[in-house]
Amino acid sequence: MRRRNFCATTCESCKAFFRRTALRITVLHCASNGLCEITAQTRKLCQKCRLQKCLAIGMRNDKELSEQIDEINSCLTGETEATKQIRQKSAAMAIVPIVKPIVDYCGINQLESSRMTELSDACLVFNYPSLSDNRVTTTDLLELMIITNRMTEVLIQDVITFTKRLRGFQKFCADDQLALLKHGFLDIIYLQGFTCYDPERQEFNYSIVS
């Protein structure tokens, strides 16, 4: 049965071995220069490699745990020298109240402006060529499906390019990025389609992108 022992999930056998070996001051040797493969069958053949494997999976001895606990406690309850200096300098500085004038206009800050610029630049990928005078009208369902499938393939690539230009989107893991693309792709298609709709003729006009 595996349990949490010495900051790592191990079996009882490795727990007992680590308590006997890691907490005593001794020099261990390996006949294979530290290249032993440690398994449930071979773990008793080389103490050095077994100890190295225990340390590799995160097991820590009592001394290291005590040092970590002391460090955490000092961070929670103590005060470093740098913190003391900052506090002393802050206390010595005069407190000058800053009164902002009350205005009706509520502008955007620098961060919001940067994000809007980033989004605007990313949207440039959807700037397709303007419609030319050479128009092709189709009422054939099969031909329409072929054209639509081709345009969808192009739009998928453009959406992927669009997301790669958003720094916030790149902070997500690959699985989350894929999930967001799957759930938001149709919305992007609809929004892009609205820009191609002619309300006077009640029809959609698309540029055929090769």
Image (cartoon, rainbow, N blue to C red):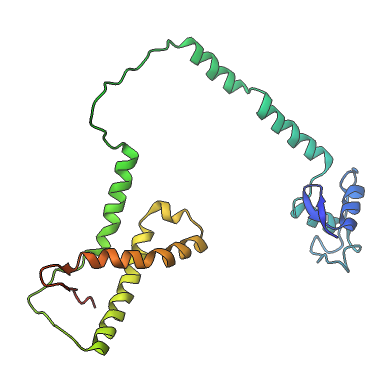
* Residue shown at 42% from the left, 51% from the top: 168
* Residue shown at 31% from the left, 75% from the top: 152
Above or below 110: residue 167? below
Above or below 35: residue 143? below
Occupied quadrant, residue 134: bottom left
Task: Indicate left or right for 112 with 205 as reference.
Answer: right
Task: Indicate left or right for 21 with 109 as reference.
Answer: right
Q: Name the quarter where the N terminus is drawn.
A: bottom right
Task: Indicate left or right for 144 with 6 as reference.
Answer: left
| Frontmost residue, 103 versus 121 | 103
* Residue shown at 35% from the left, 71% from the top: 156
| Frontmost residue, 65 versus 137 | 137
Above or below 150: residue 142? below
| Frontmost residue, 162 versus 35 | 162
Most distant residue in the left direction: 133
Q: Name the quarter where the C terminus is drawn.
A: bottom left
Q: How many marks?
A: 0
